[in-house]
Image (cartoon, coloured by chain):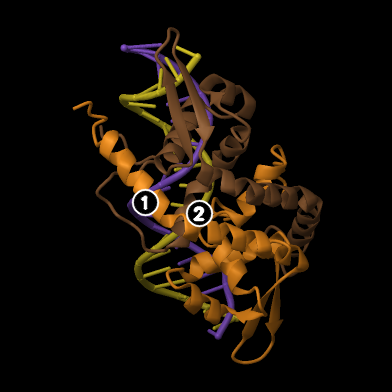
Chain colours: A orange, B brown, C purple, D yellow
DNA sequence: CCGTATCCTATTCGATACTG
DNA sequence: CAGTATCGAATAGGATACGG
């Protein structure tokens, strides 16, 4: 019944700052965080706009990921009390420091996508389904 | 009974290359991958040595993560047929291209660890346990 | 338009015991 | 030393339905 029943947001009162770095890195891991951060990299974006851009994400996961990023100070949520409601999400300075790194990361991923596919295929050929010596 | 029952290694024959980038990024996500990669950044390291350095990791997760990284061509596994056995893990060139980025990432995490903690505390104060309007 | 609540599944991970 | 097998708990994530 707590908001962080199990899901992503951990309940306040449960401190867990053991691993310095990995704890923080876990904030930008998760299936959608990087995609969201990159999407709002050049200006505020509305909720529905985000949902359509990212495509594949459910409203639930979009909300949860946005809340976590907001909680950690990586984006701000601005509510315009209009009708219909309008909510914009916007990267903070802290998040902006990440963009260069994030882009390097995704560019690395794109550059080596084929290499990885090849390596994987080779591995699966040798260490086949049953670990078969054959 | 298959090696990829559910765990980390996905069974060959199930192609899933939909998302270009995220698919690949998922390879260096996971709780231990980055730690392992950084640990082998300056030369080959043995299994037990890895286990002690990383500390907190179980043999099982060490093995699984190593296998996945090997499968994706991020490290190589060299077995010396001695007794007792000796196995060394070593980063590939592809992985070495990642180190600069990985260090930038972890340094960002360290620089902003406090900011994040503060942001989180503030968030939890406002959007308290019940989402209470108060 | 922008969410939240519930339910359910798949995946991740740790503990433990066994092996070449 | 360097693993593998099995089990079980916790968590992430999807589908769907409801609300301000």
Q: Nearer the viewer, mark 2 or mark 1?
A: 1
Write the residue at 24% across / 49% down. B13
> Residue A105: horizontal and vertical position, in percent?
58, 57
Give the chain of mark 2.
B
Other residues around mark 2 within 10 Å, as few (<14) / some (14–19) / many (≥20): some
Rendered residue at 66%/78% (across/down): A42
Residue at far left of view:
A134
| Residue indicated by mark 1 | A117
For mark 1, give the secondary structure. Answer: helix
Q: Residue at x 61, y 59 (%)?
A: A104
Identify whether A18 is placed above or below C4: above
Residue A47 in picture, x, y percent from top left: 57, 78
Q: Are marks 2 and 1 on the same chain?
A: no
Q: Is residue A49 left or right of residue C11?
A: right
Q: Are marks 2 and 1 in contact (CB under 8 Å)?
A: no
Q: Which residue does the numbered mark 2 point to in the structure image? A: B25
Which residue lies at the image location 61% right of the left edge and 22% below the top edge? B52
Q: Can residue A11 be seen by looking at this rendering? A: no
Chain on which label 1 sits: A
Q: Nearer the viewer, residue B116 or A131?
A: A131
When asked about the image quadrant of residue B123, the answer is bottom right
With respect to residue A96, does A16 lie above or below?
above
């Amino acid at each position: 019944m707590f908001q962080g029943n199990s899901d992503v947001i951990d309940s306040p009162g449960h401190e867990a700052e053991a691993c310095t770095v990995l704890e923080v890195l876990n904030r930008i891991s998760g299936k959608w965080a990087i995609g969201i951060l990159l999407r709002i990299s050049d200006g505020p974006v509305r909720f529905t706009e985000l949902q359509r851009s990212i495509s594949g994400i459910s409203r639930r996961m979009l909300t949860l990921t946005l809340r976590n990023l907001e909680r950690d100070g990586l984006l701000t949520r601005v509510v315009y009390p209009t009708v219909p409601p309008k909510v914009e999400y916007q990267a903070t300075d802290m998040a902006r420091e990440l963009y260069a790194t994030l882009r390097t990361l995704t560019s690395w991923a794109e550059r080596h996508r084929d290499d990885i596919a090849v390596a994987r295929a080779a591995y699966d050929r040798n260490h086949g389904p049953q670990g078969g010596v054959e």
